[in-house]
Image (tube, rainbow, N blue to C red):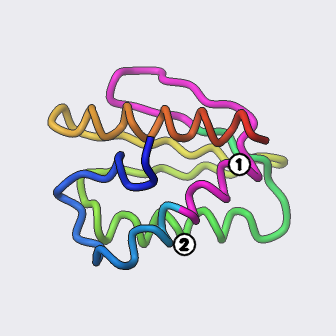
């Protein structure tokens, strides 16, 4: 999959900034992913290994992502040793979530 294949047309992030954002997601997932699940077709769950600064890093990234891709709904739930990140979309953006899940799975396997 190309670096930008999962990004939908609805994304308002300037094109020249998109590779950097993709790299941020890839780095976070490859460094911290402990599990990935799909509780429902429109819902992706990532469990990320916690640590110093990780919650702030996740919250900052999802806040910026929400600003350019308003169709995503992010819920961050910290626990003692992990950060749960739930990502939901509407029906029209299910394919985007599918692609994001595939990308996250591939990045997590590299861990």
Residue at numbered disc 2: 60
Q: What is the x, y in percent for residue 87?
A: 43, 43
Q: Identify the residue at image location x=42%, y=72%.
A: 64
Q: What is the x, y in percent for residue 71?
A: 24, 52
52 or 79, which lies in front?
52
Q: How many marks on residues?
A: 2
Region of the chain picked out in magenta, as a range: 23-45
Q: What is the x, y in percent for residue 58?
A: 60, 62
In the picture provided, is 41 more to the left or to the right than 45?
Answer: left
Q: Is residue 81 magenta?
A: no
Q: Is residue 24 magenta?
A: yes
Q: Identify the residue at image location x=56%, y=46%.
A: 85
- Residue 30: numbered disc: 1
Q: State the quadrant of the N terminus.
A: top left
Mark 2: secondary structure: helix
39 or 110, which lies in front?
110
Mark 1: secondary structure: helix
Q: Identify the residue at image location x=50%, y=41%.
A: 86
Q: Identify the residue at image location x=39%, y=21%.
A: 40
Displayed quadrant of residue 18: bottom left
């Amino acid at each position: 999959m190309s670096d930008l294949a999962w990004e939908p047309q609805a994304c308002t992030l300037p094109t020249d900034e998109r590779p950097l954002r993709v790299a941020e997601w890839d780095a976070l997932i490859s460094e911290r992913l402990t599990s990935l699940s799909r509780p429902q077709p429109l819902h992706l769950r990532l469990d990320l290994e916690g640590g110093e600064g990780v919650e702030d890093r996740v919250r900052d990234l999802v806040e910026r992502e929400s600003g350019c891709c308003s169709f995503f709904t992010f819920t961050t739930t910290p626990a003692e040793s992990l950060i749960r990140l739930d990502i939901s979309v509407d029906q029209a953006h299910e394919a985007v979530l599918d692609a994001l899940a595939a990308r996250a799975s591939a990045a997590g396997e590299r861990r």
